[in-house]
Image (tube, rainbow, N blue to C red):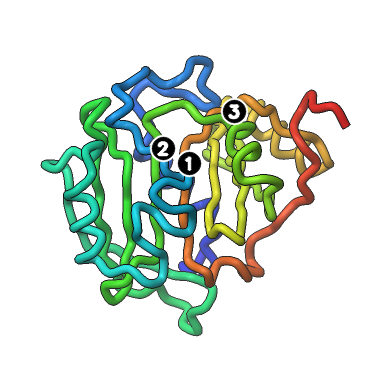
């Protein structure tokens, strides 16, 4: 599969699998450990200090790498010793080329729990293109819909070669934000994806694994298959 056709959900699956807390399984049967609230970033679901697609006064497609580093160094919930920059690649639907562009990625861990990789920022030509947040607190899909409203897109993706699962994404294009949960249960995850494609509903208590702020170019992504939002399992019509 060429990088141009790499679905957005596949990028999330690769990252989520690499950054999931040790010993976790999705959907988790237990909430995340409670950490000191001063080490929790509630901004995605509070709109404070700014609402998506703004994150701590950084804006996708506008803010620079230098501005991002300055913001990270001012945030108490970031482990300052964990901030690292690496070379990477980036592609979005607005590119005419079939290849990804050279990019830079900044990674940062939470202060609590220690060692949990919680933030990832992608840059092209020094401009912020994407933010990945791996929450260190419990937020369910129901919480996300309660705050953001009805999603503009429900997308699904398979996971795993031998033990098939289901990656579920809810996105809100007006906010340039999506949330994702990866159900890695052998077989059952695949059955869930199939049921949703046939109009089935999602369990509301699935715990969000990833929050993504994305570039405006992804709002018109024709390669992303969207299903009609039909609400949560068990919800009253």
Q: Position of residue 230 (x, y in %)?
A: 80, 41
Q: Nearer the viewer, residue 132 or 100?
A: 132
Q: Is residue 2 above or below residue 24?
A: below
Q: Are marks 3 and 2 in contact (CB under 8 Å)?
A: no
Decide if residue 175 is in sight here.
yes
Q: Nearer the viewer, residue 206 or 70?
A: 70
Q: Which residue is disc 2 drawn over?
A: 42
Q: Position of residue 60 (x, y in %)?
A: 41, 65
Cα–Cα gap, marks 1 and 2: 6 Å
Residue 206 is labelled as: 3
Q: Position of residue 223 (x, y in %)?
A: 63, 66
Residue 77 is labelled as: none
| 1 vs 3, front mark | 1
Could you classify mark 3 by the number of other residues whose Cα lies within 10 Å: few (under 14), some (14-19), or many (20 or more)?
many
The mark nearer the N terminus, 3 or 2, is 2
Cα–Cα gap, marks 1 and 3: 20 Å
Q: Residue furthest left?
A: 81
Q: Which residue is disc 1 drawn over?
A: 46
- Residue lying at 50% horizontally and 41% vertically, measured from the top left: 45
- Residue lying at 33% horizontally and 61% vertically, measured from the top left: 122
Q: Is residue 29 above or below residue 203?
A: above
């Amino acid at each position: 599969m060429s990088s141009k056709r790499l679905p957005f959900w596949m990028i999330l699956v690769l990252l989520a699998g690499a950054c999931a807390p040790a010993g976790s399984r999705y959907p988790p049967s237990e909430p995340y450990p409670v950490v000191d609230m001063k080490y929790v970033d509630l901004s995605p679901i509070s709109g404070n200090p700014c609402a998506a697609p703004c994150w701590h006064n950084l804006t996708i497609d506008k803010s620079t790498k230098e501005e991002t580093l300055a913001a990270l160094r001012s945030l108490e919930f970031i482990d300052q010793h964990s901030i690292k920059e690496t070379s990477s690649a980036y592609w979005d639907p607005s590119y005419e080329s079939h290849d990804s562009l050279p990019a830079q990625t900044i990674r940062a861990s939470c202060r609590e729990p220690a060692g949990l990789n919680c933030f990832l920022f992608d840059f092209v030509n020094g401009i912020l293109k994407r933010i990945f947040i791996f929450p260190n607190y419990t937020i369910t899909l129901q919480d996300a819909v309660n705050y953001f409203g009805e999603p503009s897109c429900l997308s699904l993706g398979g996971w795993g070669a031998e033990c098939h699962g289901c990656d579920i994404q809810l996105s809100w294009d007006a906010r340039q934000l999506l949330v994702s949960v990866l159900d890695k249960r052998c077989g059952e995850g695949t059955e869930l994806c199939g049921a949703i494609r046939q109009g089935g509903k999602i369990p509301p208590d699935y715990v969000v694994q990833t929050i993504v702020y994305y570039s405006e170019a992804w709002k018109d992504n024709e390669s992303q298959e969207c299903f009609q939002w039909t609400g949560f399992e068990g919800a009253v019509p």
